[in-house]
Amino acid sequence: MKKNFNVTIIIAREDLYRNFYKTNAFKDLDSKFNVSYLLSNNLPKINSERKVFFFEINQNSKSNSKFSYRNFLQMNRAKNRSKSFQFRVERMLYPLKFNLNYIPNFKFLKKSDKFKKIIFFFIKVILNNLKYLKVKILSSESIFKIFSEKFYYTSKENEIFETKLAETNPDIIIVPFGSQELILPQVINFCKKNKILSYFITDNWDNLSSKSVLEDKPDFIGVWSPQAKNHATEIQNFKENQVIILGSPRFDIIFNKRDQIIKNDLKFNYILFLGHLFDWNEEEVIEILDNEISSRRELYKNTKIIYRPHPQRIGRLRKINLKNVIIDEDLKETGTYWPSLDNYFKNIHNSLFVVGSLTTGLLEASAFSKRYMLLCYEDDGDFFSQGSILKKFTHFKGLERIDTIEFCHKKDELISKFRNLFEKSINSPNIKISKQLDYFIRGDNNNTFRKNILKSLDDIFA
């Protein structure tokens, strides 16, 4: 048996660089195997004791567009496997229905502007339905096999990338991923040609239930939890022995920090508010809570709300002018980017409790033993309302198992639930972590991603 195996780890994006490379997620592998890191050349080039190579990502826009559209067709073909696929198709072709509530700020527009918006919106609905008809036709069984194979098939050959991979002489290639990208089938193509093992690792909670299907499957796939393992077998058609529960490097940080005393630099109590990627009306909620704090000063005293918009929320300025609300320091800039995890976790750790939308933040807050007030009510026909999102995403099924979560299913319960959680949290900011959290994210100080990924490679190479 070979004594020293070569492991190549590919990091292709900024979020993966932050979540895996900067967290030293593979440090235990470094000490046992001959590990090479292959990083996209748009990532930081810093001095490191690790063996690091850089590669040029395929920027051929035509190939990427064809690959993306083929994945879109695959997702529509597989929509019976996951509710999230159906919603994602509708979201990417939004709007498919004519609804005045879908027009942003419609009630505040002038009459002349309302007429223009209605006409524009109506035309957009018609065009999107034509696009949807095209998707249905092209994703049908017979048409897909003939037409799509011919017109939307993308070559998996990438000589420049393969040359870089060959330099590392790998026995196994590990790829953290968050969405369907052309680099994934390119890696598998290289591995099959050279009889090398492939091992993909999910970065996010919903990677296997909402980001289409993996048409080209690796030999192994690492996932967060038992829930994600179910998604891998039931939605993605992996075999049981191909799926390995690893946890997540981000949650390793939480498990390490949650029992520590982390200094709070702020001179006041605060509630953390976590925003959503989708464009729903979270600003209205913040205004309601701001008024609640102002109107009951004897209860809340100098309590503030720290508002953390989603880092990737598009088209919103991160500005707000309210008495009791402060924008998170990491998110004050406009645009989309990936801020450090350090301040984020510090803000969760020192909060009284967390209010927020349907994001991974609800698991992160629960892992920190914090109560999470989940905003999940329907909102006047809003396509992106959190109540609608809760029903349409597969990975949110079963959240009621987690007793750290307080569901706000009705808008008129917003103030009473907020007030109740505040009173509870003043006396007891932290609560016992629900064992049911393990179903959604596996791990603790003794069961870390670093240890699990090492054990999985020991088993693979045994």
Image (cartoon, rainbow, N blue to C red):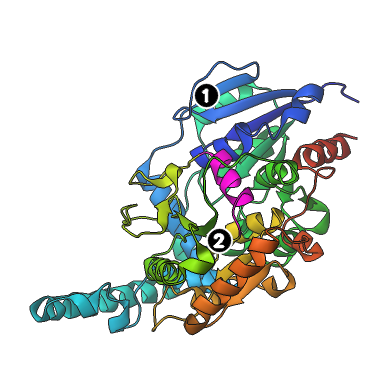
Q: Is residue 356 left or right of residue 231?
A: left
Name the foreground residue: 366 vs 419: 419
Q: Residue at x 20, y 76 (%)?
A: 108
Residue 409 vertical position relative to residue 432 in the rendered view, above or below: below
Asked if residue 77 shows in the view, the reply is no
Q: Which stretch appears magenta?
A: 340-352
Q: Height in image: 221 above or below 353?
A: above
Q: Which residue is mark 2?
A: 359
Residue 278 seen by the camera: yes
Image position of 31 (left or right of 154) = right
Q: In front: 15, or 60?
A: 15
Instruction: From the viewer's side, name the closer residue of 387 and 70.
Output: 387
- Type of residue at label 2? Thr
Label 2 neighbour load within 10 Å: few <14, some 14-19, many 20+: some
In this rendering, which labeled residue sits more in front, label 2 or label 1? 2
- Give the residue type at disc 1: Phe
Indicate the secondary structure of the residue bearing disc 1: strand
For residue 442, which quarter of the picture? bottom right
> How many angstroms separate mark 2 from mark 1 (CA)?
32 Å
Q: Closer to the camera, 249 or 422? A: 422
Q: Residue at x 81, y 43 (%)?
A: 445
